[in-house]
Image (cartoon, rainbow, N blue to C red):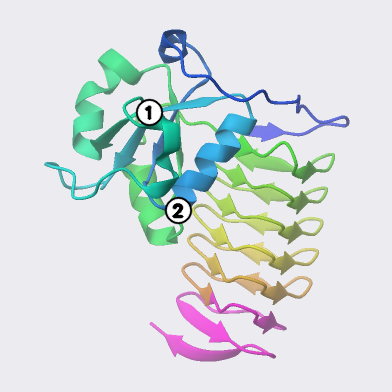
Amino acid sequence: MCICVHAGGFHEAACPYVYDAALWSSDRAWIVAGLGGLAGELTATNERMGHGVIAYVVDPVHDGALPLPPPAWWGDRAGRPTILHTPTFLRLWAAHYAKARFVIGIGDPATRHRFAQALAACRTGFAIDPSATMMTGASVGEGAVVSAGTVVSHGTMVSDHAYVNYHVTLGHDVYVGDCAVVCPGAQLMGGVQLGERVFIGTGAIVLPRVTIGDDAIIGAGAIVLRDVLPSTTVVGNPARVIERT
């Protein structure tokens, strides 16, 4: 399923979220996969949208005791949302979390892909910060995230479980592939095509109609003038290949 933004948009001013018991049985309940800094940023985005996070899910494979205390950004959320390993969450999902939607707050594309597979049976949401600009005809897939200050131009698609960070510019007719991550300040010009699990570093610029293959990595600040093959890392201005796997 894909959500299309029409003229006029769909955002309303989000009120600060207050935790309440009714949240657990409402469409405002969200699950965030991850517990690092990006999960904290995604939590803030969800709250600005008027949603609330009821659980954080970590480690898509292993079960057992959690290795870390709640993170510094947890604040007054302590004791409210739960932290669960993914296998535990899946055992409890039907009984306790079936109405909640999940999004992934993790910056590594391969890990995003693993979580998307592990949680495939669960309901998926999408998160668009109220300060983002979504032009007419822009669209997002299931689990996609568009962060504060980002501009998504007409005809552009942010596909399933892709994460577009703060103050990114996505030109017209751009495609951001499944589980791709675009870091803050990057600029993707018109017609750029990103494959699955691509990583675009902070401040990188990709020129018009360039195609970036699956699992490629674009270094921070790189200026990409031509197509990049799958599983290739490029850096610099102009971008040059430093590794191919």
How far, Cα to Cα, is label 2 from label 1?
23 Å
Residue 227 visible, this angle: yes
Residue 1 visible, this angle: no
210 sits to left or right of 53: right
Quarter of the rendering occupied by the C terminus: bottom left
Q: Residue at (80%, 59%) from the top-left corner?
A: 171
x, y percent for residue 52: 50, 25
Q: Residue at (69%, 26%) from the top-left corner?
A: 14
Q: Residue at (57%, 43%) from the top-left corner?
A: 144
| Residue furthest out toward the front | 76
Residue position marked by numbered label 1 in the rendering: 122
123 sits to left or right of 218: left
| Residue furthest out toward the right | 7
Element type at mark 2: helix
* Label 1 Cα crowd, 10 Å radius (few <14 / some 14-19 / many 20+): some
Q: Residue at (31%, 27%) from the top-left corner?
A: 79
Residue 156 belongs to the span the image colors magenta:
no
Along the line of sight, the residue nearer the viewer: 49 or 145: 49
x, y percent for residue 17: 56, 23
Residue position marked by numbered label 2 in the rendering: 37
Q: Tag 2: residue type?
A: Gly
The image shows residue 126, relative to residue 61, as above or below, that is above
Quarter of the rendering occupied by the N terminus: top right
Which stretch appears magenta?
Answer: 218-245
x, y percent for residue 110: 38, 60
The image shows residue 45, relative to residue 21, as above or below, that is below
In which image quadrant can residue 236 be found?
A: bottom right
Q: Tag 1: residue type?
A: Cys
